[in-house]
Amino acid sequence: MNHSQPLCRLADIPDGDAIAVQVASATGGFELIVLRRGERAFAYHNECPHAGRNLDYAPGRFLVRDGRLTCAAHGATFAVESGACLGGPCRSGLVALRVDVVDGAVWLP
Ligand code: FES
């Protein structure tokens, strides 16, 4: 994992929405969903616990509304601020990664 670069600028994420961010790693990397609510950011692996699909409906585009993120594949719904399963076919929540917002940038600690 590269700790010398932020994941993104907070301003890169429209407030109340989400973007996809690729993270490099020794095993080939992975994709995160990075969501914004005001001055806070939340990050989850872009892998739905229902059937393992990505949650976006088009690359980097997510269904986010009223603090809920909906998987585009079969409609599982998750809380933006915790990743908890709120409805639909999921039985568990999203895998969260802690992120910090420092000087307008979103970082993995
Ligand atoms: S893979 Fe997300 S709801 Fe089925």
Image (spheres, rainbow, N blue to C red):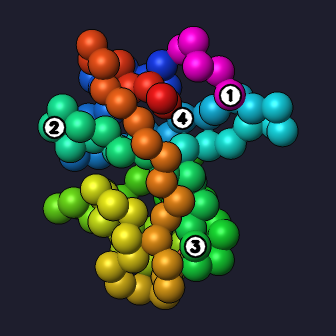
Give me the residue at 57% from left, 12% from top.
4
- Circle 3 Cα neighbour tier, 10 Å, few/some/many (<14 / 14–19 / ≥20): many
Q: Observer-nearest residue: 23 or 58?
A: 23
Q: Earlier in the sequence, mark 2 or mark 3?
A: 2
| Amino acid on which disc 3 is placed | Pro
The answer to whether mark 3 is within 8 Å of ligand 1 is yes
Q: Earlier in the sequence, mark 1 or mark 2?
A: 1
- Circle 4 Cα neighbour tier, 10 Å, few/some/many (<14 / 14–19 / ≥20): some
Q: Observer-nearest residue: 50 or 108?
A: 108
- Circle 1 Cα neighbour tier, 10 Å, few/some/many (<14 / 14–19 / ≥20): few
Picture coordinates of residue 36 (x, y %)? 28, 41
Give me the residue at 65% from left, 21% from top.
2
Q: Which residue is mark 1?
A: 1
Of circles 4 and 1, which is in front? 1
Query: Can you say whether 50 is above or below 71 in the image?
Result: below
Please tell me in which quadrant of the rendered image residue 106 appears: top left
Give me the residue at 63% from left, 32% from top.
23
Q: Is residue 48 visible?
A: yes
- Magenta segment boundaries in residue numbering: 1-5
Query: Can you say whether 107 is above or below 18 in the image?
Result: above
Distance from the alpha carbon under mark 1 to that under mark 2: 27 Å
| Amino acid on which disc 4 is placed | Val
Q: Earlier in the sequence, mark 2 or mark 4?
A: 4
